[in-house]
Image: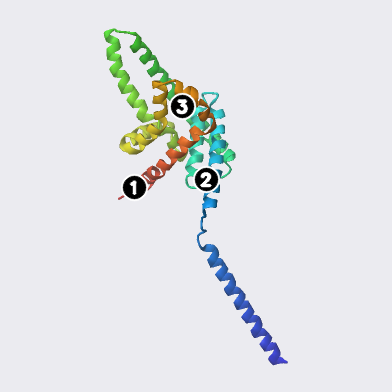
Amino acid sequence: MSKDIQNGKNDSQTNELGKTTAEKLKEADNEKPEKVTGGKRVLRIVDKFGDLFLLNILFFFSCIPIFTIGAAFTALYTVTNKMVKDEEGPVKEEFFKAFKANFKQSTIIWLIDLVAIIAVYLQYAYVVTSSSEGARILFIVLGFEFILLAFAIPLQFPLLARYENTTLNIMRNALVFSMAYLGTWFRVFFIWGFLFVLYFLDPKIFIYSWYLWVLILASIFAYGCSLIFIKFYDKLEKPKE
């Protein structure tokens, strides 16, 4: 009887060892990278497109009060920076969380930019309607001002979306980094500026495409910029010795 009990214990131990081994093999299989089929890849693309569509709608309506455009851009970049790494949560929650967290600082930056843009536009309007010597000198000054704005603005809200810093440092760093990383700046400037150049050359293009800004265009552009910013952030955070 004791022999039978002993055999029973041995069998029990063997089964337990067998079960443990099976579990380990199963865990090892689970650790293997999941094979991404064509169907899954398509579903991921469709899911990403749906998130970008929702994000664009949230961004568009957040921009309507005009003075909230800075906060909307910061929230937009905050979400797309996560999307390119597949780290985003619910788009709506992520967007409004970033919108509220950066509202004050991003609004101050945007209002400063807006005043500068209006000042440059008024100077441009004076130059094109005047033939005085002062207007010619102002035209040269206007060129420098435009270049300064072109370098200063594109990286402001991406930096604010990524880092905590003072308003002055964000604006200063945006200008310095634009000049130091010309490749990054040019690609971002081109992505946002290309269509506006087309609109300036042929306003009819805007009439035929304005609804795309409401539906998807802004989030697509921000997503494309965030793909560029991945390497840019790495250069800032992990500089080579």
- Circle 2 sits in a helix, a strand or a loop, which is it? helix
From this view, report whether residue 118 is shown above or below residue 47.
above
Q: How far apart are marks 2 and 1 (CA)?
A: 33 Å
> Is 92 or 97 nearer to us in this picture?
92
> Is 15 or 114 nearer to us in this picture?
15
Amino acid type at image mark 1:
Pro
Density class for disc 3 (Cα within 10 Å; few <14, some 14-19, many ≥20) is many
* Left/right of residue 152 with respect to residue 13 in the rendered view: left
- Circle 1 sits in a helix, a strand or a loop, which is it? loop
Residue 212 screen position, x and y as percent: 51, 30
Q: Which of marks 2 and 3 is nearer the N terminus?
A: 2
Residue 18 screen position, x and y as percent: 60, 77
> Is 157 or 224 nearer to us in this picture?
224
Q: Mark 3 points at which residue?
A: 110
Quarter location, residue 135: top left
- Circle 3 sits in a helix, a strand or a loop, which is it? helix
Amino acid type at image mark 2:
Ile
Density class for disc 1 (Cα within 10 Å; few <14, some 14-19, many ≥20) is few
Q: In which quarter of the image is the N terminus?
A: bottom right
Amino acid type at image mark 3:
Trp
Q: Name the residue under label 2.
A: 45
* Left/right of residue 103 with respect to residue 140 in the rendered view: right
Q: Name the residue under label 1.
A: 239
